[in-house]
Image: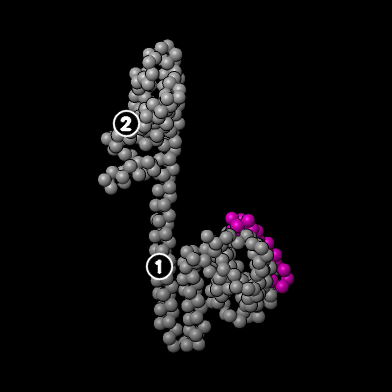
C-alpha cells in the first residue's frame, strides 16, 4: 500500500509517470465521482449532463497524460448520453452539448499536456543545473586542493633553499603562510560569509600589518558579497604590491567602511607610494573593479591622485537568508 501511495504522489507531482493500471484506476475513480456529482445535481437540475465530467477530464489528463485524458473525455461523453437520472431520452440538443463537451475537453487536454511538457522540460533543466553546480563544486574543491599542495611545495622548496639564510626566510615564511590562510578563508566564505575586517586582514596580511590601517565597525558579509569583495580587495592589493603603496618602503594604505541603511561604502586610500605615471588601457583587473558590484546594485570609482590610488566601492548588502 505504501508503494502505491508513493507512486501516486510521484505521479501527481510529476516526478515520475504512473503505471498504466494506476492511471486507469484514477480515471475510473474520477468518472465515478463525476457521475455521483451529476446525480446530486440532477436532484435540482436534471438537464446537467456533461458539466461534472470536466473536472474528471482535467485531473485524469494531469495525472495520467494525453491518452488517459482522451479516454476519460470519451467515456464521460458516453455516460452523459447513456446514463439518465430522469425520464427523458437523449435528443438532438444533448448531442449538440456532447459536441461542445468534447471540444472543450480537447482544449483542456491540450492545455494540460502543454503544461506537463513545460514542467518536464523545467525539471530536466533544473536537474542539469544541479548536476553542473555539483560538478563545479567538485572542480573548485579539486583546484583549491591542488593550489594548496603547490603552495605547500613552494613553501618546502624555499625553506630548503634558504635554510642557511634565516633572515630572508623570516621575511618570506609569514607571507607564504598568510597567502595560504587567505585561500582557506575564500573557500570558507563561499559557503558561510565572513566579517569584512577578517577578509581585509587576510588579503592585506602578507604585505605586513604595519603597512595598513582598517577603520570601521564589525560587519558580516553574506557569502556572495564576501567572495566578490575578496576578488576586488585581492586585485587592489596586488596592484598596490606591484605599482602602489606596498611597492614603496614608506607606502601606507587606509581602508575604511560605513553602512547606511542597507548600503555599504568602502574607501581604499593609498599614500606615500610611487608617483602615478601614465595610465595604461584598462585591463581585466580594472574591468573587474568596475563591474563586480553591479549584481549588488553597486558601483566602483577609481581615481589616481598624486598621493596614490583612491577607490570608493558602494553596494547594497543582501539580506541574510
Residue 206 place in picture, x, y as percent: 54, 77
Residue 58 place in picture, x, y as percent: 41, 32
291 falls in the magenta region:
yes
Residue 277 place in picture, x, y as percent: 69, 67
- Write the residue at 47% across / 78% down: 177
- Write the residue at 37% across / 21% down: 85
Separation of marks 2 and 1 at Cα, in angstroms: 59 Å
Above or below — where is 50 with respect to 300?
A: above
**Badge 1 is on which residue?**
145
Indicate the colouring scheme: one colour
- Write the residue at 52% across / 60% down: 321
- Write the residue at 62% across / 60% down: 316
Query: Looking at this view, is 179 or 224 the one in front?
Result: 224
**Badge 2 is on which residue?**
28
What span is colored magenta in the figure? 290-309
Residue 119 place in picture, x, y as percent: 43, 40
Q: Categorize mark 2 by other alpha carbons within 10 Å: few (<14), some (14-19), many (20+).
A: some
SS label for mark 2: helix
Q: Quadrant of the N terminus?
A: top left
Q: Categorize mark 1 by other alpha carbons within 10 Å: few (<14), some (14-19), many (20+).
A: few
Amino acid at each position: 500500500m505504501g508503494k502505491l501511495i508513493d507512486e501516486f504522489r510521484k505521479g501527481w507531482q510529476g516526478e515520475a509517470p504512473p503505471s498504466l493500471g494506476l492511471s486507469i484506476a484514477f480515471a475510473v475513480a474520477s468518472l465515478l465521482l463525476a457521475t455521483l456529482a451529476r446525480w446530486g445535481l440532477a436532484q435540482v437540475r436534471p438537464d446537467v449532463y456533461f458539466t461534472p465530467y470536466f473536472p474528471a477530464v482535467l485531473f485524469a489528463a494531469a495525472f495520467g497524460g494525453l491518452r488517459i485524458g482522451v479516454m476519460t473525455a470519451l467515456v464521460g461523453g458516453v455516460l452523459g448520453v447513456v446514463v439518465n437520472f430522469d425520464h427523458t431520452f437523449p435528443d438532438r440538443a444533448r448531442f449538440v452539448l456532447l459536441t461542445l463537451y468534447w471540444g472543450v475537453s480537447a482544449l483542456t487536454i491540450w492545455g494540460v499536456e502543454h503544461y506537463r511538457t513545460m514542467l518536464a522540460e523545467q525539471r530536466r533543466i533544473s536537474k542539469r543545473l544541479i548536476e553542473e553546480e555539483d560538478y563545479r563544486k567538485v572542480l573548485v574543491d579539486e583546484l583549491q586542493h591542488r593550489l594548496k599542495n603547490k603552495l605547500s611545495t613552494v613553501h618546502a622548496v624555499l625553506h630548503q633553499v634558504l635554510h642557511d639564510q634565516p633572515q630572508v626566510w623570516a621575511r618570506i615564511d609569514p607571507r607564504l603562510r598568510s597567502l595560504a590562510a587567505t585561500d582557506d578563508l575564500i573557500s570558507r566564505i563561499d559557503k558561510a560569509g565572513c566579517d569584512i575586517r577578517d577578509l581585509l586582514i587576510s588579503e592585506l596580511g602578507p604585505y605586513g600589518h604595519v603597512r595598513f590601517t582598517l577603520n570601521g565597525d564589525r560587519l558580516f558579509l553574506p557569502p556572495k558579497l564576501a567572495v566578490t569583495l575578496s576578488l576586488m580587495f585581492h586585485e587592489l592589493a596586488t596592484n598596490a604590491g606591484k605599482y602602489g603603496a606596498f611597492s614603496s618602503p614608506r607606502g601606507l594604505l587606509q581602508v575604511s567602511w560605513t553602512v547606511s541603511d542597507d548600503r555599504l561604502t568602502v574607501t581604499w586610500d593609498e599614500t606615500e607610494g610611487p608617483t602615478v605615471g601614465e595610465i595604461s588601457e584598462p585591463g581585466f583587473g580594472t574591468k573587474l573593479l568596475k563591474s563586480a558590484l553591479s549584481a549588488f546594485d553597486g558601483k566602483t570609482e577609481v581615481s589616481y591622485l598624486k598621493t596614490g590610488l583612491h577607490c570608493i566601492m558602494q553596494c547594497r548588502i543582501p539580506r541574510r537568508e
